[in-house]
Amino acid sequence: MNSHIAYPFLTCKENDITSSPWILSLNACEPEAVEQFISGWDYSSKIQFKRTIEINFPQLSITLGIPLKHLNLEIVTILGTGQGRTPRSRSVINRYSIEEGKATYDLTIPCESIQLSRRVKIETHIVIAAIPQNQSPLSPTTIGSKVWKDETDLRLEGNEPRFPMETASFRTMFPNKTYTNSLWYLSWRPEEWDEDFIGSVRLYLNSDHDDFVKRFLNLDLYTHQTVMNDIIIQILSKFLSDTTTEESFDKFEDGSVGSHATNWITSAFPDKSYTSAKSVFEHRPGDFHATILALSNFKRHTKND
Amino acid sequence: MTKLLPRLNAAQVQDLINLSFEYQINEAKNFPSALVSTAIIGASGGSRVQDRELEHLCTTIRTIATDFGYPDLKLTQRQLFEVEVAIFLAGSDLFQSGEGLRDDVWAFIATVLLPDIVIWRHDIKSSSTVVDSDEKLSTNHFKGGVRNTFQRLWLRAKALDRGLNNVNRWELLSTLTEDALVQLIERPSISASSRLSVAIGEGWLRHSKKSESKNMEPIMRRFMVLIRRLNEICLLDYFDDHALNETIDRLFNDASLKN
């Protein structure tokens, strides 16, 4: 309960109710306890929260001053979303009747990710569900009176970088192009090295090739490696051919296309220099392509990290 | 699929207004400007909005504005203009997802796509007025939030929508006074629940009809204090329709008695 609110009626005490943390299931992955930030979320994510509440009903009856047979309570879960101190959108998700002989309640909140924005705030309330016929002078008597409440506020999306991409039918999006039948397409503007990477680079996966998209979304290692290799090769080939980039190397603003190119070069080539990468690119193309292919192996990065 | 919309954070809004606002106003009319094609958008989970969809948004709002005198005449029928824009925004496909709740999305619309309409709507005289420290409210019309020129209208429509099948779907939006709308929408602890907002709007309507001679402004202000206080100790979302309406009427009466 909020300690800064003076309730004009009796409310629950600490030992009347025991609640587990909310457990999050994201995209059918193993459920885990929620942290402050939900990583890997986007509008297409499948998301569900679960928790258990244990209620000592006889004890609660004493705390609230309402005899057991007159005590009618419900658990109500509310989901809020949208930025600001208070969510900009909130609605009741579920109601659970509390029964005298039942102590444990499993709460579930399925979320429509498409309706979420920046944060998820889950409120759990226990409220008076019927006017008690017999009670103490300080007992809550109005339907909806909050006798217990807790809140969990979680951030979505955050500052963690995610590769900008989307799935689309190329037959619809890029009809009659030479690449209509391609598996993927990288949309970007060469030579605009100062532009924001997330805003100016976008990978399109061709949903006309269902098997390929499934493999990609299921994080198939070789599929990812092949696509990433193409992306990095495309960008670095132009970067290293551009006469203006050597001077700006290491000076690009974080998050720009240029800073991504710089990071790839310093990660892939031992002496981390522009000159050495350019030399390999121009004189030993086999080495250059294989080096980038190795760089594109996420499993390698995971192990090394 | 979710339409991913361009975003502009508060610092970027300030930069644009400070550095190149006159230029930006002219650019906005030549859609799409460079700022549109290079804007930051969500990384994944949807489909990048098409330029033609943004262009349609701009064209429609400028067309509505033209009916009310834009660009040459001062806006005199402000409420009618805003109701029309709010209804259009509420029905637009672009804002049906969580993107509509993002401040930075609305900041982009006001600052990059339609700054000329913001200036016309609020009768801002020049760019220097916009950044004048004494005119903070003007900058707020561009930044995201409850005072953003377009976001506030979308929030109003979203909160006071009686539903698709209601023949007088937008009566609350077009009848509540500016003060009543501000009192409601700038209190997200109440307006975040559209069921609660509609019920309060209906209560305001009933009470204003009942007490024609009374000024609803102080009544609504006192009512909002009372209902926010009650909302702290009672879960108003839990009330059934009858109990909710009865409670709202009682609080309007209480607020009215103290007038």
Image: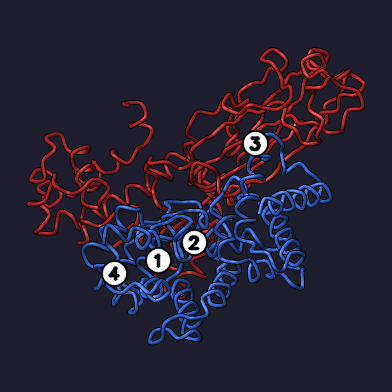
Chain colours: A red, B blue
Task: Specify which label sits upstream in the sequence, 2 or 4.
Answer: 4
Q: Which mark is residue B151?
A: 2
Q: Earlier in the sequence, mark 4 or mark 1?
A: 4
Q: Secondary structure at mark 1?
A: helix
Q: The N terminus of chain B is located in which quarter? A: bottom right
Labels 4 and 1 positioned on one and the same chain? yes
Q: Are marks 2 and 1 in contact (CB under 8 Å)?
A: yes
Q: Let me know if marks 2 and 4 both belong to one chain.
A: yes
| Location of mark 1 (residue) | B110
Q: Earlier in the sequence, mark 2 or mark 3?
A: 2
Where disc 4 sits, the SS reads helix
Q: Are marks 2 and 3 in contact (CB under 8 Å)?
A: no
The residue at which mark 4 appears reads as: B34
Q: CA distance from mark 1 to mark 3?
A: 35 Å
Give the SS element for disc 2.
Answer: helix
Instruction: Specify the subunit that label 1 lies on.
Output: B
Q: Secondary structure at mark 3?
A: helix
Q: Is residue B96 left or right of residue B68?
A: right
- In x, y percent, where is residue B14? 28, 57
As measured in the structure, the alpha-carbon distance from the residue carrying label 2 to the one carrying label 4 is 23 Å
Q: Earlier in the sequence, mark 2 or mark 1?
A: 1
